[in-house]
Amino acid sequence: MASEETGGVSRKWIVRTAVAAVLVLAALVALSACGGGGDGDDGDDVSISGVAEVTERFQGLPQSGKTVGQESAAVEIVEYGD
């Protein structure tokens, strides 16, 4: 019968360590998804400066989602590289 020892480390120890690592990783992912803490502020009363200036600058431009301007507008791409 084969021994459970693998170079002095038991298979049970390896399995338990792997399971513990997975549980820690799952807990970290859950904390990250939930925000992970903070001061409890839900962000409803956030004040952003410059909103009026941005609204004025983009007034009259067509907008669809995150896209601002006409879809048929010409685009020029300049790439700088070494």
Image (cartoon, rainbow, N blue to C red):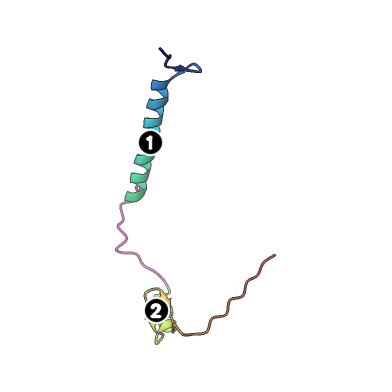
Residue 34: x percent and y percent?
32, 49
Under circle 1, the secondary element is helix
Q: Position of residue 14 (x, y in %)?
A: 42, 25
Quickly name the residue at label 1: 22
| Of residues 18 and 11, the one drawn nearer to the viewer in this rendering | 11
Residue furthest to the front in view is: 1
Magenta stretch, residue numbers: 36-49
Q: Residue at x 41, y 85 (%)?
A: 61
Query: At which x and y percent is residue 9?
Result: 46, 19
Callout 2 amino acid: Ala
User: Which dot, 1 or 2, sits closer to the camera?
Assistant: 1
| For marks 1 and 2 on the same chain, the one whose residue lies earlier in the sequence | 1
Question: Vertically, is 35 above or below 62?
Answer: above
Q: Which mark is residue 66?
A: none
Q: Is-magenta flag for residue 46?
A: yes
As shown in the figure, which amino acid type bears the numbered disc 1? Val
Residue linked to disc 2: 52
Rendering quarter of residue 76:
bottom right
Name the quadrant of the C terminus: bottom right
The single residue placed furthest to the bottom in the displayed view is: 60
Residue drawn at (34%, 64%) of the image? 46
